[in-house]
Amino acid sequence: MEHTHFMEVQHLTKQFGEGDTAVRALHDVSFSLDHGEFVAVTGESGSGKTTLLNVIGSLILPDAGSVLVDGMDITKQNDEALAVYRRRKIGFIFQNYNLIPVLTVEENIVLPMNLDSTEPDYTYLGDLLRLTGLESKRRCFPHELSGGQQQRAAFVRALIHKPDLILADEPTGNLDSKNSHEIINILKESVERYHQALLLITHDQTIAAQADRIFRMEDGNLTEQSRGDVL
């Protein structure tokens, strides 16, 4: 019996603009991702990395191709189904923390679940706060945290609803090397402990080298790299 992957990206194509000014962001991109797997995508600015992440996150539609998640093709779902998919299946982590200044760390973390009328698992929240070293900061406001602590809070917010898939776009882009290393270790531990799938975009080769598999994006084309090419 053929193995089916948790996520299968098949022949994705995406172009922005028309005629001479057209930019081909994705060109026949295909790959798979399984639970418990950490995949990194590297590449220059404008190579199509973020477009790929946004299509998988259903933030934009491709021109052609499909994204199967747990057997469901997200490119063929209506807006309501996609909103549920984003809220419940995916944890988004961006370079900008997007924390709300007037809410405490804990209030920021549980806000997406409140908006979804879902009760947070406070035992799990406690586990995540311990994992990220934020236990003593849960009543603090964002301006009382360091950049590394704010990114950890954004990370916990992305995980509180127990997503199957974590999509991270340059999550360490605003951090120094010590904080970057710690954030990646936390992500790896979460993927292993909670059997999630992680797709991470980075320009940092030392971060990419920690992934189970590494892909490079160039002019909309995705190619898998051997570890020797990266290390």
Image: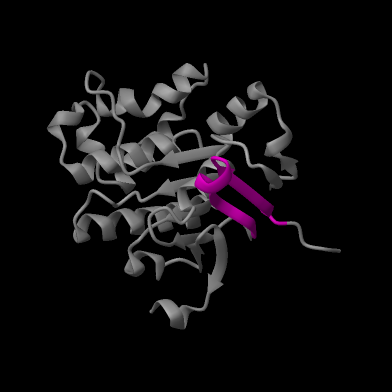
* Percent coordinates x, y for residue 155 in the rendering: 36, 41
- Name above or below for residue 91 compared with residue 80: below
Q: Is residue 164 visible?
A: no
Q: Residue at x 22, y 51 (%)?
A: 175
- Name above or below for residue 19 compared with residue 76: below
* Percent coordinates x, y for residue 152 in the rendering: 29, 43
Q: Is residue 193 left or right of residue 77?
A: left
Q: Main secondary structure of the magenta part?
A: strand
* Percent coordinates x, y for residue 46 in the rendering: 42, 53
Q: Is residue 52 in the magenta section? A: no
Q: Residue furthest right?
A: 1
Q: Is residue 38 visible?
A: yes
Q: Give the colour scheme of this rendering.
A: one colour
Closer to the camera in the image, 89 or 77: 77
Closer to the camera in the image, 188 or 135: 188
Q: Is residue 7 in the magenta section? A: yes
- Name above or below for residue 229 compared with residue 177: below
Q: How many marks?
A: 0
Q: Residue at x 20, y 36 (%)?
A: 136
Closer to the camera in the image, 101 or 26: 26
- Name above or below for residue 61 compared with residue 35: above
Q: Residue at x 65, y 21 (%)?
A: 80
Quadrant for the C terminus, please.
bottom left
* Percent coordinates x, y for residue 144 in the rendering: 13, 31
Closer to the camera in the image, 168 or 197: 168
Residue 104 sits in which quadrant? top left
Residue 178 sits in which quadrant? bottom left
Quadrant for the N terminus, please.
bottom right
Question: Which residues, given as a range, are shown in magenta?
Answer: 5-31
Q: Residue furthest front?
A: 20
Q: Is residue 121 left or right of residue 10?
A: left
